[in-house]
Amino acid sequence: MRISNRRYRLRSRLLLLLAVLALLLPAACSEEQGPEAIARSFVAASKEAVQERRLRDLRDLIAEEYADPAGRTAQDVLAVAAGYLMRNRSVHIYTRLQAATEQDGRIQATVLVALAGRPISDVSMLPSINADLYRFELELVEQEGDWQLASATWRTALVDDFFAD
């Protein structure tokens, strides 16, 4: 039973991370900003929204047609995020945008994310705190002037990934 609970918690965290990343890419007009600027401004806005537990903002940033290689839908991501936020008193996020490019009207972004129960003010804290570290590959689509998460994959990241150039 312990392994089963551990897998459930890990799965919940991964889905929350996916939901968080949906918030990490802002609704912005691509004619005014390039893909990196869009991703960076949304990272700041989404961190605030998640830490303040604004699930409505998250819902608006995930495309209705969201589908990932694991078969999850937008509703799946929202349900897990809501459950995670209910179980965790505080969620603090540190992010590092590694790359953002646009191709065929879609933005591909690579984002490193650290989630912890206490504030992460600087990357130098990561080796000394208990944080879940992930690398996300995101695909964003623009719908009615807003960028939304269409799909994502992720894997565990290493602390060293946050320090690489």
Image: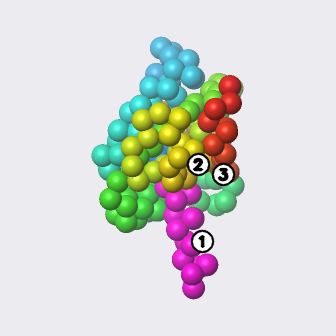
Q: How far apart are the two marked residues, 1 and 3, measured between alpha carbons?
A: 14 Å
For the C terminus, the quadrant is: top right
Q: Which residue is mark 1?
A: 7
Q: Position of residue 12 (x, y in %)?
A: 52, 64
For the N terminus, the quadrant is: bottom right
Q: Amino acid at mark 1?
A: Arg
Task: Tell me the chief SS of the magenta region.
Answer: helix
Q: Which residue is mark 2?
A: 133
Q: Quadrant of residue 4?
A: bottom right
Residue at image location 64% in from the left, 28% down from the top: 99
Q: Amino acid at mark 2?
A: Leu
Do the numbered discs 3 and 2 sit on residues whose CB atoms are within 8 Å? Answer: yes
- N-terminal-most mark, 3 or 2: 2
Q: Nearer the viewer, mark 2 or mark 1?
A: 2
Indicate the secondary structure of the residue bearing disc 1: helix
Which residue is nearer to you in this view: 89 or 131? 131
Residue 162 appears in the picture as rendered: yes
Mark 1 residue crowding within 10 angstroms, few (<14) / some (14–19) / many (20+): few
Using the image, tell me which numbered label, if any, was put on residue 91.
none
Q: Amino acid at mark 3?
A: Thr
- Range of magenta residues: 1-16
Is 137 on the left-hand or right-hand side of 43? right
Q: Which residue is mark 3?
A: 156
